[in-house]
Image (cartoon, rainbow, N blue to C red):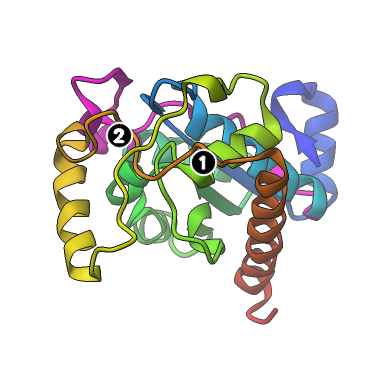
Amino acid sequence: MVDIKSQYDPQLRKIIKRKKQVAVIPVGSIEQHGPHLPVSTDSEIVTEIARKISEKKNYLLVPTINFGVSREHAPFFNLSLNESTLEKLILDLSESLFENNIKTIFIINGHHGNLKAIKNIDKKLKKKLKNKIKVFTLSYWHYMERDFDHAGFVETSLMLAISKKVKMNLARKGLITDKMTKQEINKIGKMASKSFPKVTKNGIWGDPRKASKKDGKKLFAEILENLEQKCQTCLTGHG
């Protein structure tokens, strides 16, 4: 792995010149994650995932974009960008990588609210740069079997595996959807995308109380294995 932010110019240019490079851009958010997880949770998880993948596949790791589209969490705390701002930021950064002769980019997304902002980035870049760049947008939670949550069992377990900032004594049960139909869950999901606190009350979707470091490590292993296979498929057309 080449962690771009810790490199020096001459060496970095040699690395890029030596062979075709693949860059990874992690995108997170700063927003509430209940009383027991830090507001940096999304950014910390996606940074770790991007770092592990970059280490395994020897990719260039770009510094994490720590801010995302999070206004749906108001009046709980969030530092949010507009969708157009996040999209422009990623477009500009990708174009800058291209200008440095890095023509393959993975955007690893760690926050659901960012989905609209990253949706058509690959098409826009290919059009602007005349198909001379390859860009793939991947949201990490699509690469595990377990249903995702927000500050619930999954995210809390993932954070326990990588951070000492989790305050399990403050973990509380949030919105539980186990007995709901898919239609009911989809309806609530649409409501949450506009106002998360209206559907969760305490800002938690799921139940974090039984989360563990052991489960977090298992989830990370599953996500990384599936994401690595997806990256390989993107680059070669086959697994």
Q: Residue furthest bottom?
A: 238
Give residue 69's mark.
2
Is residue 25 at least partly visible in the picture? yes
- 85 with respect to 49 (left or right): left
- Quarter of the C terminus within the rendering: bottom right
Residue at (81%, 42%) from the top-left corner? 1
Query: x, y percentage for residue 184?
Result: 17, 63
Query: x, y percentage for residue 102?
Result: 64, 47
Assign the magenta stretch its main secondary structure: loop
At label 1, the amino acid type is Glu
At label 2, the amino acid type is Val
Residue at (22%, 31%) from the top-left corner? 201
Give residue 155's mark.
1
Query: x, y percentage for residue 24?
Result: 62, 45
From the viewer's side, name the closer residue of 65 and 134. 65
Q: Is residue 80 a member of the stretch shown in magenta? A: yes
Residue interval drawn in magenta: 57-86
